[in-house]
Image (tube, rainbow, N blue to C red):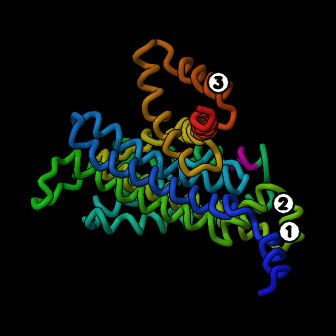
Amino acid sequence: MSESTQVTSRAGAPPRGQAQAPGRRVRRQWIVAGVLLAAAIYAPFQLVPFHVFQLTMVLVYAVALLGLNVLVGHAGQISLGHGAFFAAGAYAAAIMMFHWELPYLATLPVAAAVAFLLGLVLGVPAMRLRGLYLALVTLAIAIFLVPLLKRFEEVTGGSMGLSLAKPAPPAWSGLAEDQWLYFLALAVAVAAFLLAAGLLRSRVGRALHAVRDNEIAAEVMGVRLSYYKTLAFAWSAMFAGVAGCVYTWVIGFVSPDSFPVTLSITLLAGIVVGGLGSLSGPVLGALFVMFVPSLSQDVNEAAPGVIFGLLIIAVMYVAPTGLAGLAGRAANSLKKTLRKG
């Protein structure tokens, strides 16, 4: 190769630091994920059962918020009825375990399929509605759910709900019941996050981002808006249904009053506070949803809702892009400080 050709090829190539930067970033992300996973595996052996239960519920809410993040953060749609999909998965698992006595692991794919199909059906209005109108339609679904569940008493148990036996740990595991439920939730959460990461990096994820950023431009580029909007609702509902199924395992009881309208609003607040469009946002939002209401109750038993609302306002004022964005800015500031030092 001649010298001029070598110069030309070097000039056309990106700087070595820039070419290696994405690879280093991915490696750092995997290292951080590995450290967090190791800490999550170690945690239940060091905590009392109640705190293990709290962490288990954090994992359940994280999977539910992961689905909402696909819809709101990556597809640009809004939903105030995510709690209905959560309830659909919970009741699908509960009915199969209570009436048909199916093994609890067998209920997971069925609950996911039921919620996915429900999301497909309810995603049809998303083809023509947007903004406030879409929010009102999804809110109506959440409002309609509770009286519907109470009406079919022979199947759902009506207002009394269904009581179920929690999954017992295998004898070979040597785990207590709370630890076994925690590891079940952890395994489902890890699988859900890997699935979501692969989905969002695929052609489907790129199409969802195009729809979110500019629907007209996306349609001009050949993206089928109706197809991908409906698909976003279906995927979002599927993750919520999986979370509802694990919720049934952990709690061992479901009733219509377990899934009020406020659940959908709380989940939406959780993903906004955690950080839209980020894989870490659902985890941070789940921590917020799980621990902030209990802390608010401890501060003032007479007005926990007021304190909860004020904390949401304070977080959004300090971190308008969510806790994930705040953590990212803090990490960048730390890097700059270390480089200067």
* Residue 331 part of the magenta segment: no
Amino acid of disc 2 = Glu
Front residue (pair 311, 16): 16
- Vertical arrangement, residue 260 with respect to residue 98, above or below: above
Whether pointer 1 and pointer 3 mark residues with C-beta atoms closer than 8 Å, the reply is: no
* Residue 136 part of the magenta segment: yes
Q: Give how far across and how far down residue 331 sits, in percent.
A: 58, 38
Amino acid of disc 1 = Glu
**Residue drawn at point x = 38 percent, y = 59 percent:** 188
* Relative horizontal placement of residue 59, taking residue 12 as reference (left or right): left
Judging by the rendered image, the residue that carries numbered circle 3 is 313
Residue range highlighted in magenta = 134-138
Q: Give how far across and how far down residue 205 sits, in percent.
A: 66, 65
Whether pointer 2 and pointer 1 mark residues with C-beta atoms closer than 8 Å, the reply is: yes
Q: CA distance from mark 1 to mark 3?
A: 36 Å
* Relative horizontal placement of residue 42, taking residue 339 as reference (left or right): left
Mark 1, other Cα within 10 Å: few <14 / some 14–19 / many ≥20: some
Front residue (pair 106, 145): 106
Mark 2, other Cα within 10 Å: few <14 / some 14–19 / many ≥20: some
Mark 3 or mark 2: name the one nearer the start of the chain.
2
Q: Secondary structure at mark 2?
A: helix
- Vertical arrangement, residue 221 with respect to residue 239, above or below: below
Instruction: Please identify the quadrant where the C terminus is shown.
Output: top right
Q: CA distance from mark 2 to mark 1?
A: 6 Å
Q: Give how far across and how far down residue 79 sits, in percent.
A: 66, 48
Can residue 261 be seen by looking at this rendering? Answer: no
Using the image, tell me which numbered label, if any, was put on residue 219.
Answer: 1
Judging by the rendered image, the residue that carries numbered circle 2 is 215
